Amino acid sequence: MASSTIRPSPASSSFRLYDTTSTCAASLVSLNSSSRRFPYLARAVPQSHFFGLRASSKIWRGESRCISAGNMAQASTAASLLEWVKKDKRRMLHVVYRVGDLDRTIKFYTECLGMKLLRKRDIPEEKYANAFLGYGPEDSHFVVELTYNYGVDSYDIGSGFGHFGIAVEDVGKTVELIKAKGGKVTREPGPVKGGSTVIAFIEDPDGYKFELLERGPTPEPLCQVMLRVGDLDRSINFYEKAFEWSFFVNEIIQITR
């Protein structure tokens, strides 16, 4: 049986916008939209350092003042990153969204995306069940929490939610595996517009989009959550003040989908 090429391994990866309290990034895109439905993100208490570096309260903009992902990676080893995760629990924890068939989605995520089922529970008295999946234990990794409400087999995802980002070592092989499993590919592997990073887009059985990004080994393949917002500066200001996140802009590529 073919297996997913998505595997955690020691290194760090780059994102367009950084939450300095987590290995997962929150990517915000400003588009005019009347629909704001999207999954919610859960995180612990904020902190003010990342990879051993003091986080600035300033939002960095422009090439001359940009802190690149490569420089940040050089500032820390994978060992120090994992050691920090063990000692400091203040980070993004999970993202929650609803699905129409819990077992079907678990099968897709484990067989096609290489995630592990961490735990599953059924709450009959509340008429719902949920499952937690990810690329490592919940106490050290960002995970997804799938929720199934009894009797509801589909949802209107809306236009507020964009996609999840997953880093893989070989986008082409991952896409072929997903196709072999009957998955839906909405954008074939190829360089991102205006850049050289190879990407692809797929959809899970409920229509949630995933961007596959071809990158080197990383301890956290589930690396990005993209949300659409009506006012980018307002949203950045909110996240910075509410959670004490600091964002480092590496690159901004606008793609309308």
Image (spheres, rainbow, N blue to C red):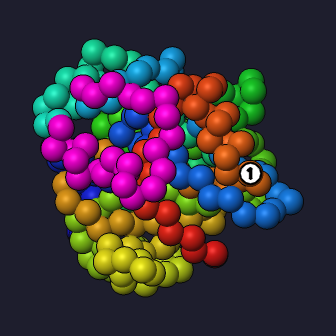
Q: Residue 191's x, y, as percent?
A: 36, 81
Which amino acid does the dot numbered 1 rest on? Asp
Residue at the image point whose x is 79% and y is 64% from the top: 32
Q: Residue at x 39, y 58 (%)?
A: 63
Residue at 26% across, 76% down = 173
Residue at the disc numbered 1: 231
**Measured along the vertical axis of the image, is residue 247 above or below residue 213?**
above
Mark 1 neighbour class, 10 Å CA radius: few under 14, some 14 to 19, many 20 or more: few
Quarter of the image where the C terminus is located: bottom right
Point out residue 176 in the picture as x, y percentages from the top left corner: 33, 80
The reply to whether the magenta stretch includes residue 197 is no
Q: Nearer the viewer, residue 90 or 63?
A: 63
Is the residue 32 above or below the residue 27 in the image?
Answer: below
The spot of residue 171 in percent (x, y) is 31, 73
Q: Quadrant of residue 158?
A: bottom right
| Range drawn in magenta | 52-75
User: Is residue 236 visible in this depiction of the protein?
Assistant: yes
